[in-house]
Image (tube, coloured by chain):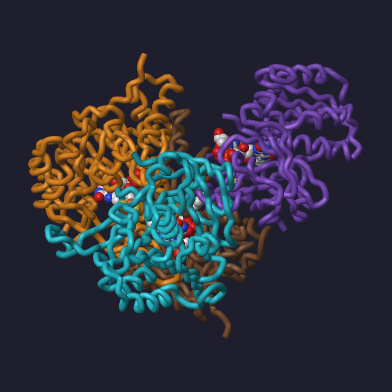
Chain colours: A brown, B orange, C cyan, D purple
Amino acid sequence: MGLSLQTEIAGLKLKNPILSASGCFGYGEEATEFFDINQLGGMVTKSITPLPRTGHPPPKVVETASGMLNAIGLTNVGLDRFIMEKLPFLQKLSCTVIVNIAGSTVNDYTMLAGKISSLEGVDAIEVNISCPNVDSGGLEFGASPAEAAKVIRAVKKASRVPVIPKLSPNVTDIVAVAKAVEDAGADAVSLINTLVGTAIDIQTTRFKLSNRFGGLSGPAVKPVALAMVYKVASAVKIPVIGVGGISSGDDVVEFLMAGAKAVQIGTACFAEPTVFLRVIDELSTYLKKNNYQNVNDIIGAVKDG
Amino acid sequence: MGLSLQTEIAGLKLKNPILSASGCFGYGEEATEFFDINQLGGMVTKSITPLPRTGHPPPKVVETASGMLNAIGLTNVGLDRFIMEKLPFLQKLSCTVIVNIAGSTVNDYTMLAGKISSLEGVDAIEVNISCPNVDSGGLEFGASPAEAAKVIRAVKKASRVPVIPKLSPNVTDIVAVAKAVEDAGADAVSLINTLVGTAIDIQTTRFKLSNRFGGLSGPAVKPVALAMVYKVASAVKIPVIGVGGISSGDDVVEFLMAGAKAVQIGTACFAEPTVFLRVIDELSTYLKKNNYQNVNDIIGAVKDG
Amino acid sequence: MKFSGSVEVSGKTVISRNIFSLDIVSPQIASQASPGQFIQVKIPGINSVLWPRPFSVRKIKDDIVTVSIKKCGKVTGLLYDINRGDRLYVTGPFGNGFILPQMGRSIYLVAGGAGLPPLLFLCESILEKGYSPKLIHFYSGARYVEELFANDELTSLGVHSVVTTDDGSYGIKGLVTEPFANDLTKVHSGKDDLGPVIYGCGPMAMVKKVAEICHGLECYLSLEQLMPCGWGVCNGCAVKIKAGDSDNTEDEKGFRLARVCKEGPVFKASELIWD
Amino acid sequence: MKFSGSVEVSGKTVISRNIFSLDIVSPQIASQASPGQFIQVKIPGINSVLWPRPFSVRKIKDDIVTVSIKKCGKVTGLLYDINRGDRLYVTGPFGNGFILPQMGRSIYLVAGGAGLPPLLFLCESILEKGYSPKLIHFYSGARYVEELFANDELTSLGVHSVVTTDDGSYGIKGLVTEPFANDLTKVHSGKDDLGPVIYGCGPMAMVKKVAEICHGLECYLSLEQLMPCGWGVCNGCAVKIKAGDSDNTEDEKGFRLARVCKEGPVFKASELIWD
Ligand SMILES: Cc1cc2nc3c(=O)[nH]c(=O)nc-3n(C[C@H](O)[C@H](O)[C@H](O)COP(=O)(O)OP(=O)(O)OC[C@H]3O[C@@H](n4cnc5c(N)ncnc54)[C@H](O)[C@@H]3O)c2cc1C
Ligand SMILES: Cc1cc2nc3c(=O)[nH]c(=O)nc-3n(C[C@H](O)[C@H](O)[C@H](O)COP(=O)(O)OP(=O)(O)OC[C@H]3O[C@@H](n4cnc5c(N)ncnc54)[C@H](O)[C@@H]3O)c2cc1C
Ligand SMILES: Cc1cc2nc3c(=O)[nH]c(=O)nc-3n(C[C@H](O)[C@H](O)[C@H](O)COP(=O)(O)O)c2cc1C
Ligand SMILES: Cc1cc2nc3c(=O)[nH]c(=O)nc-3n(C[C@H](O)[C@H](O)[C@H](O)COP(=O)(O)O)c2cc1C
Ligand code: FES
Ligand code: FES
């Protein structure tokens, strides 16, 4: 009997549950210098905004203990150049392609969702709601269940493909946000985006990031991500995509047992571009060793310890 | 000219800004097997509850990347035995003694604050509001500005010594909580308590903690703690005590530059009981090298990078 | 005062593919430590792992403290590559250690895996004090031959000694508690006035088995738990044991929390609660 | 295809208290890399540091890629203790590398600190292709003698070479850009038809100075930035450079983002924006 790694998110069949995370994999082209990215379950693009953005000035990255801070600031080519320059490559892929979108107003999101979801080759839209909502005073869309629901309801109306909100961990009650976007029609959720953090250069008495604050990612945040994934997966019916600090097949098994139907890998691919393949391998080995024939058998399997 | 490390929190003169963190230093006695704890700026006791608590059953600790999870569950001797068995030792100390209290109802807190603040040798009370509030359905007191203010207002009335709420980082807006407790009369705030996290044993398919969730501490959380300390210190007038992932004099300098008037060290003393002395030394070295004569000169000194 | 600081590794002995000993120089620990106590060891510069690791004191000679280590995970794997001249960060000694037996009673030492080093230290200590090797029965077990902490050292003591391995790759095949249980039944029916004293150390499942076998006898067991600090401040190692009369706790009556690193690691078998 | 995998260290040369070279075995990198390109290096098992570290290719011989490293922090400190037979995790080669000069033009190479290895590789490569050493002027500076990446290697090339140290502990005392600026003024007034080609590599402050000195001349500068990935996916290394006509960005017009790891590390001096 063969081993099946296939899993399904919002009607999308993934050949395995391993995806690349937004902002850590460009638009996919760079990775082809290392491996055939059709071996992935899927890939998620960098967040696309209506217009191109250069993002924050350097310095915009800091290393921290088992983690890193980034204040890249949504550097991206913007919608038009995405369509002209990046889409043709994505259209040739056989793995699932998820395009991540970000905006400052509900209008930004619906415009992006409408246009991008009608492009051939785009299988789903991931909605980055960790951006400051200019219409409501700069607080993140993802910071309140009501605001999150508002943007997702609008995106859902505009989109022809499944809509996957990406939740911010910087909230008191992520389950409330997840339920709100579920009610608003979300087809799945992915979590977590980065935790807000900072670092100071004590020689210059300055913030190490031009933007003062950045987002913390990497193995340091894994326990936080895993707890949130478990809580959300236990509370909603839509599939959950787990992300945060994953760098091994064993990490993937933890997220799947916590209830994630798929996972994304971000920071870990910086040092090891082929981490995805190693992780798929390690996941298979774990399943075989423990006599599972189907990866779905471990999803949500965790019991009290 | 001598170097001054002296700093002041809510009228308490600390000979230096280095304190032990609650739950990581027992009631102080164990450390005397290693060094004279009067060399510290001060010490904070384990959280005291009205009655003794055995806490959660093992396993209750997990190692994570540059961090650890604990689900100790407020194991402590309870108020009566604290007074009988632990207080006499604390009364002999010349460093500042802060007693941390925790409860499940507002009444628990006021009773504890009333009794403990009238004991000789207790210089201040730190209020752990990261506990589930049984009166309001189990949500943490610290999760909402209004609930936090309610408990602090009551504690403030009951207490004869300065009251220092210890804030939870598991909130959307820690500044709102800090401002609420400032308005409620808090004399200072300390932050952060631990971040909620979990870990799964993939061999047994069980949570690694009997309580499912635990609190993340250690260097992994330092960037998050530092960001919150900076935001709160910029927004309130009362002094801020910084805590989270500190293990070196350079870490202390970062927290002071972010606006903390003192810091606490928790997890780092597990492996190195004398970490406090090393850190005081490293802090002095930094100040001397950079021609500061007074530690207060670097408090809040950070500028944009 | 307990010790906390950087120490030099003055010697290393590789015993098998998995077992090795490190000698460290610490007059302060050497002058205090007794059998059953342990030290906490951290490798400087390995920053992603925060907790030190507990190892029982195996031997003391002048200023040198020896620990014997089984390679079985992250830190022990890295310790295997430590060499003479390298430095480690060490704290200790911690724990209560074993209560030495009164002269003349027959002694049963039952060691599983990493339980051997402290019992060997105990055995050597009482022999040095003039205890008769004839009264000492030493049972030591491991999963397979490469996981045996000592062999020649054991036989050269002149005590009754039985070695088992789970897979039969050395000594008797099976669990160490089996020959021990057999022999103890025989003695039990003997004429020993005060009865035997039993010391057990090893994995939880094994010491539990020893406790069952020794029901009603004088038996001391050393427990293993995760130990974030080792010096009593974190409560991470705490287990429930039977309480004395005066104890009351919020959660339950009749129980009391004991920190394995401080009130233990050695407990009277009769105090322990198995669930 | 670029390489990503574990490689063996086949040799190590200690050049001074602070400088050393590592030879690594990687046919895949060796067959592709050109002067100015770099590889990313990670020490397996050092888990608290996530990012790999960029080092320029110094030399290629058969399957062996050599990098020269200055000990100056966490990872380079640990790399100093790496020995022959150890393994590293390596990816690359990355970046655009230097555009080789047309034969016959005079060349100025200006290296500060860790800028030397790639320029030395460039110099050796063009000499091998038959470039006349007489046309090559090599300026290399360091803070003090123990931070010089090469010396004998440099003089044996037969090119005009000037070495400076900030503290005068070797060669001329002062910044490397000073003798370079002096010499260039002389040449400038010379009869060189196409004009000189300048290559600069080193710390930001130094390459900025080179850009000022070379205003209007053909000048290529290699930049240093923090490099979380090295393969173009994180945008952490991106800097603004002057944009072509067709570019528009939300934040500003006339600028364009260039990833130092991908579109660089070598840029035309005239493209760069200093602020
Ligand atoms: C009081 C005491 C004395 C000990 N004396 C010795 C000794 O003399 N020689 C020796 O080789 N070992 C001894 N141990 C066990 C030793 O501490 C562990 O093997 C070691 O901590 C594993 O570290 P690691 O990083 O290599 O393993 P990890 O990578 O952390 O874990 C590997 C495996 O070891 C288990 N483990 C981890 N820590 C412990 C622990 N504290 N106790 C039991 N199992 C653990 C884990 O659950 C896991 O299955 C003692 C333990 C205690 C509590
Ligand atoms: C394209 C490129 C090629 C390089 N080639 C070489 C080379 O051939 N030989 C060589 O010795 N070094 C080279 N460097 C610099 C080298 O990458 C850094 O010295 C190294 O990353 C420092 O690592 P660390 O962990 O020891 O230092 P850390 O402990 O991380 O930091 C120590 C100090 O070094 C500085 N630093 C850290 N990373 C960099 C970086 N990427 N660039 C510049 N400064 C940095 C820090 O700001 C800090 O002041 C190159 C850098 C780049 C970008
Ligand atoms: C450099 C960097 C850039 C990122 N950019 C984006 C982004 O544009 N949009 C987004 O939704 N998430 C972005 N993220 C967040 C990641 O997709 C991911 O949620 C987070 O890093 C946690 O996963 P990890 O620990 O595996 O990196 C970025 C992360 C990093 C490190
Ligand atoms: C084992 C353990 C027990 C703790 N117990 C308490 C407690 O009883 N009350 C409290 O307010 N904080 C408690 N804390 C939180 C610490 O005081 C501190 O806020 C947190 O650990 C972050 O600091 P650190 O990274 O220096 O450990 C505990 C932390 C640990 C690791
Ligand atoms: S290990 Fe911390 S109290 Fe025992
Ligand atoms: S280092 Fe990541 S894009 Fe250049």
Looking at the image, residue D100 lies above or below residue B48: above
In the rendered image, the quadrant that contains the C terminus of chain A is bottom left
- Which of the pair B28/B7 is nearer the observer? B28
Looking at the image, residue A292 lies above or below residue B128: below
Disc tally is 0
In this orientation, does residue B298 appear? yes
Residue drawn at (19%, 42%), measured in percent from left and top? B99
Q: State the image coordinates of residue A152 (x, y, percent, origin top left).
A: 37, 62
Residue drawn at (44%, 56%), measured in percent from left and top? C124
- Which of the pair C248/D13 is nearer the observer? C248
Residue that protrudes farthest toward the top in the picture: B1
Q: State the image coordinates of residue A62 (x, y, percent, origin top left).
A: 50, 42
Answer with left or right where residue D100 lies relative to residue A191: right
Q: Residue A144: which quarter of the image?
A: bottom left
Q: Residue B256: which quarter of the image?
A: top left
In this orientation, does residue A109 appear? no
Residue drawn at (78%, 20%), measured in percent from left and top? D184
Answer with left or right where residue D203 lies relative to residue A163: right
In the rendered image, the quadrant that contains the N terminus of chain A is bottom right
- Which of the pair C80/A69 is nearer the observer? C80
Q: State the image coordinates of residue C217 (x, y, percent, origin top left).
A: 27, 70
Q: Residue A157: which quarter of the image?
A: bottom left
Answer with left or right where residue D80 lies relative to residue B269: right
Looking at the image, residue D63 lies above or below residue B18: below
Residue drawn at (43%, 44%), measured in percent from left and top? C30
Q: State the image coordinates of residue D258 (x, y, percent, origin top left).
A: 62, 43
